[in-house]
Image: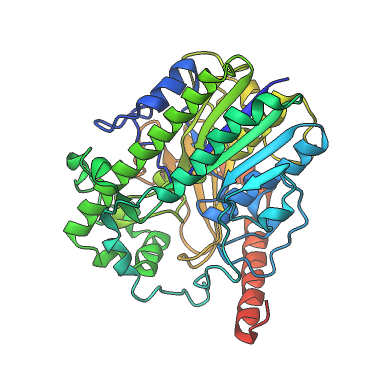
Amino acid sequence: MTNSIVLISDEHNPFYSSVYGHPFIRTPNMERLARAGTVYENAYCPSPLCSPSRSAFFSGKRVHELQNYSNCNLAIPSEAPAYGSVLREQGVYTAYFGKTHVYAPADKLGFSEIHGWKEMKTPGDVNFVRRPLAIREGAADRANGFGVKEEAFDGDLKVMDAALRWLRETAPTLDAPWNLTINLLNPHFPQWNTEAYWNLYPEAADLPRLGRNEASANHPYAQDLRDHFETDLFTEAQIRGLRRGYAGNVAFVDDQLGRLLDAVDDGGFRSTTQVVYTADHGDMLGKFGMWWKCSLYEDSVRIPCIAAGPGFPEGERVRTPVDLHDVQASLFQAAGVKRPADWVGSPLQLIPADDAERVIFSEYHGHGTRSGAFMIRKGDWKLIYCTEAPHLLFDLADDPDERFDVLADHPVKASELENELRRICSPETEDERAHAFQARQSELLATGKP
């Protein structure tokens, strides 16, 4: 039996790292973890939004099964058991540090111990209405959230310090296998840095290579998101500042991963403990004129996923698509205990390096788009199925930036991927179910009843 550690950052676009090919941003500790283990080159989140993605990771369920569609937490069913409690019930000691932001209160998730959690107060985000589409008035002011603040990383440092203290002081005393989960808030916006991190990458104050003139930027759902967040009002100076600050945030997270790897080595845990670095979703960072998450385009829905320790070959790169459900399954595989049979995902340790038939699913029902969207990734092909807009098909081998929708040229492939989607759910049924649930949430908001 093996111990496990998972470090989860918030909103890390994997392409902002040297491991995933950024031309100048260096992430030496991600590289260090990659050398010691395995890089999953095509990893995805279950939904590109904090609460839905995290809730799916915690529960092993699809977002539409949980009905945790957005960051509004009114009336979300909370009876799904979390991985921390299921592991604990089988003799695995589970410790959790940092942000939860899931379908149930942190103290109800069943971990052996949980510290420093950050969860959204009820009702959470109330801008989820899609019929008619809610616009965040004044949202463009968010674009001023970058620059130097000496307290920028204080919250994450507090979480990381406590987790490393647990690893030094508590983990060695345990006579059972254990899991440690650490959640950091960076590189999530706003993009504040300490001065040292702000000065690391002045060249990151660039402009996106692909902007609002691209066809993908003008898909109805993309335009919805641009309207919702008022991103077309961002100035060039703001765009440059946000991108520079994000690079500093990523460097900070990489340094925290380095502290964790040092503690694993210093504690003699390397041969007995798997370490996974991942994130809850990505960030568009101005590509196609879009910011933050909420889109099924690659920069938003992709995540980093690097794992080392027992069960992970050194220096390997896996092309087979994976997702956060697989990360969670790897914790059970490490501990050698049973995972509920109806939970989604397979252990990372058991996924072949290049399986062109494996299907990955993601979905989005949250704020900023008029209706639901569903993603199927299979091999190099990716379908985005939109219930109230044209569907999109991309050949990621030829077009990794998703500039060219080729659905009209490949109807058979589009039909194949749609069939894979319908094996998982009916997109029309789940879209209307989500709208009905959100209408109920709106009623509760209007009446003031939680």
Q: Is residue 297 left or right of residue 328?
A: left
**Residue 143 image position (x, y, % from top left):** 28, 62
> Which quadrant would residue 289 be assigned to in this image?
bottom left
Q: Which of the pair 308/113 is nearer the observer? A: 113
The quadrant holding residue 322 is: top right
Residue 413 appears anywhere in the view: no
Q: Say how many tags the image has.
A: 0
Taking the spot 48% from the left edge, 25% from the top edge, the residue there is: 261
**Is 110 situated above or below 311?**
below
The x, y position of residue 12, in whole percent, is 42, 43
Residue in the picture at 66% in, 57% down: 103
Location of residue 180 by image quarter: top right
Closer to the camera, 92 or 440?
92
Q: Residue at image x 55%, y 14%?
A: 313
What residue is shown at x 35% (from left), y 29% (from top)? Answer: 27
Q: Position of residue 248 (x, y in %)?
A: 30, 42
